[in-house]
Image (cartoon, helix red, strand yellow):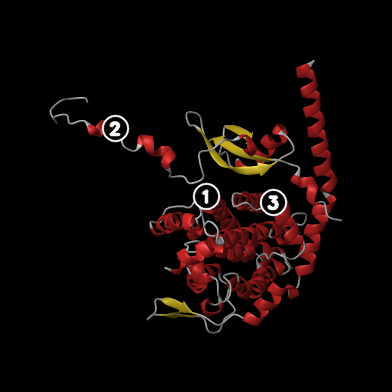
Amino acid sequence: MTTTHSAASDAGGAGQAAEEPLAEHFEVTIARDRRIEPRDWMPEGYRKTLVRQIAQHAHSEIIGMQPEGEWITRAPSLRRKAILFAKVQDEAGHGLYLYSAAETLGADRADLTERLIEGRQKYSSIFNYPTLSFADVGVIGWFVDGAAICNQVPLCRSSYGPYARAMVRICKEESFHQRQGYELLMTMMRGTTAQREMVQDAVDRWWWPSLMMFGPPDDASPNSAQSMAWKIKRHTNDELRQRFVDMTVPQADKLGVTLPDPELRWNEERGHHDFGTPDWAELMRVIKGGGPCNTERITRRRTAHEEGAWVREAATAHAAKQHERATKESTA
Amino acid sequence: MSDRTSSNEWPLYEVFVRGKRGLNHVHVGSLHAADHRMALTHARDLYTRRNEGVSIWVVRSEHIAASSRDEKDPFFEPSADKVYRHPTFYDIPDDVPHI
């Protein structure tokens, strides 16, 4: 295995001999499907890959509050408003579980936030598309959270313990997100022609960006093989994309909407659906900052962070004062 | 412009939740807060949105002392060779009741 060697060389010359047994222990732990825990020795590459993936995942949850959050004030009923509130609150929670996991690897939370708002770390491309009608809230729950479930359920077995445990919590909550979306769409489909058209329009706009959420095709995903070897990832991008399509087609039938792909059909031989190729040039464009809402999303996040600075400072000052007072009383 | 330091000053707390009466508190994750009181309310909002707990402990991460860095190391060796601490070590005939 080459990993052992690269692990040792990553760490530099000095402790190379001492690290051989540590590297071996790491390899054996992974091979036996056991979890790596925060204080274990791990190759630098493993740590870096995890920090990047977990931070990107956390940022996605945090930015993901925005597209749907915009509809909280315009939700059509108190019931829908309360549901949407709870959902957006969950997204914040998911982001925080993940930042917490990233910190066990030595990352600093404030630094990760800086990296996000300075554009040095990415978040999921899907959140750079606008939410044009309330049907989008439903379709995001159905497609985007559905795709997230496909991605995340296998991550509950990820080799890094704190990440896997965060995913378990997240997956439990994600199921509510997907179901509320689908139920919302069923309600709209029982409504007027105009409402049904809104649903179909939202489906047309979100289908392809949702397929892109799984990332580039396997032959253009250079880091996948290493992540699979380390069991950080459990399935390839294309496998997960296929799973999502197979899962969604019957749901679309039941709902009575058409998925906007003329090449989509059941392939008896493969036992899977065949489907068209997403516009990978569009994905690259959105990832590089050229999506419809990239600037808006980051600006909003930056503003919230900067406008909240005085609150963080005030809380720190208050805590210091309380502490000082308590110390004085106990020594008096 | 940048307020890199302000949230850095909020220390890290580890959070432990008792799921229900009769169970131990279990570590669930961490969060940042200015003081204990804020850490508790943040922990409630973050880790018990769906009745996952009846009691929460928070403790500053830096106040936790831990065994050495690998989870399996010589520190635990004293217990490794004492098989006689386990009930299965002892042979008791099958026809002896309730033991």
Whether residue B53 is situated above or below residue A220 in the rendered picture: above
Q: Mark 2 points at which residue?
A: B86
Look at 49% across and 68% down and name the residue there. A247
- Name the quadrant of the N terminus of chain B: bottom right
Question: Residue under circle 3?
Answer: A109
Q: Which residue lies furthest to the right in this view?
A: B1
Give the CA separation, mark 2 to mark 3: 44 Å
Which amino acid does the dot numbered 2 rest on? His
Specify whether A62 is left or right of A1. right
Whole-percent x and y of residue A125? 67, 69
Q: Which chain carries label 1?
A: A
Residue placed under numbered mark 1 in the picture: A165
* Residue type, numbered disc 3: Arg
On the same chain: label 1 and label 2?
no
Q: Which chain carries label 2?
A: B
Q: Is mark 3 on a helix, strand or loop?
A: helix
Residue B89 picture quarter: top left
Residue at 53%, 84% in the rendered image:
A263
Q: Quadrant of residue A91?
A: bottom right
Q: Which residue is drawn at 57% across and 38% down?
A: B51
Nearest the eye: A69 or A114: A114
Q: Position of residue A6 (x, y in %)?
A: 50, 66
Which label was assigned to residue A221? none
Task: Give the mark, 1 or 3, whose residue is nearer the N terminus.
Answer: 3
